[in-house]
């Protein structure tokens, strides 16, 4: 009945650490395509609203991908264990809608991680340039405001994409 094989969470995490969303191919193509869509969306929105994208963030975000790669392999293993899992459950796991819902969590994690990393970077640059008050204001207010702004934007875009991909209320 169950045609899902188990995946190693550690291997999935390592692949995602070095390959980013391409490491999700190991878990399933639906997760790869959803993660690729989310990654492109994340980069394009930051480019359009002209927020800084420090080069080091390309490498730091791989830790977020690795964490989700590990978690996705664990979720797949729950479905592969076949303890009360029906054919419909497996079909649902393989659907793009299910993968996209899980990848919206990746998007929010990337947003929060980006806000903290860039906020700390900008605060450091302010402190290094002798602008102590600006650095303190960034630490106290800037990171939270950036996180709120980006979370609002990406939540709105995720909602629109869920309507486009016909992800209904059964996941919530």
Image (tube, rainbow, N blue to C red):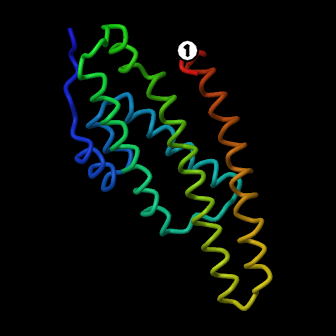
Relative to 108, is 163 above or below? above
Q: Nearer the viewer, residue 16 or 89?
A: 89
Going by the picture, which residue comes out furthest to the bottom? 130
Q: Say left or right for 89 vs 126.
A: left
Give coordinates of residue 123: x percent, y percent. 67, 76
Point out the image quarter for the C terminus. top right
Residue picked out by circle 1: 170
How many numbered discs, if any? Answer: 1
Give coordinates of residue 119: x percent, y percent. 65, 68
Point out the image quarter for the N terminus. top left
Q: Say left or right for 4 vs 159.
A: left
Going by the picture, which residue comes out furthest to the front? 83
- Displayed quadrant of residue 5: top left
Give coordinates of residue 124: x percent, y percent. 63, 80
Relative to 69, is 52 above or below? below
Picture residue at 75% right of the left edge, 69% below the top: 140
Give coordinates of residue 107: x percent, y percent. 55, 43
- Looking at the rendered structure, the secondary structure element under dot 1 is helix
Picture residue at 22% right of the left edge, 35% below the top: 7
Picture residue at 78% right of the left edge, 79% below the top: 134
Picture residue at 65% right of the left edge, 81% below the top: 125
Q: Nearer the viewer, residue 41 or 57?
A: 57
- Displayed quadrant of residue 127: bottom right
Q: Say left or right for 10 vs 94.
A: left
> Dot 1: within a 10 Å radius of its alpha carbon, few (fewer than 14), some, or many (20 or more) residues?
few
Q: Say left or right for 161 vs 103.
A: right
């Amino acid at each position: 009945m169950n045609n899902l094989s188990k995946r190693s969470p550690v291997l999935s995490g390592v692949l995602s650490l070095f390959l980013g969303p391409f490491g999700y191919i190991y878990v399933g193509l639906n997760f790869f395509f959803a993660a690729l869509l989310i990654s492109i969306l994340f980069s394009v929105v930051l480019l359009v609203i002209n927020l800084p994208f420090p080069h080091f963030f390309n490498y730091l975000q791989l830790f977020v991908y690795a964490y989700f790669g590990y978690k996705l392999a664990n979720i797949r293993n729950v479905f592969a264990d076949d303890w009360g899992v029906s054919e419909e459950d497996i079909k649902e796991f393989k659907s793009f809608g299910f993968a996209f819902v899980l990848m919206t969590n990746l998007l929010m994690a990337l947003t929060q991680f980006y806000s903290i990393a860039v906020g700390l970077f900008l605060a450091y640059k302010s402190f290094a340039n002798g602008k102590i008050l600006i650095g303190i204001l960034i630490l106290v207010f800037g990171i939270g405001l950036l996180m709120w702004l980006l979370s609002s934007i990406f939540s709105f875009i995720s909602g629109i994409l869920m309507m486009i991909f016909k992800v209904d209320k059964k996941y919530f």
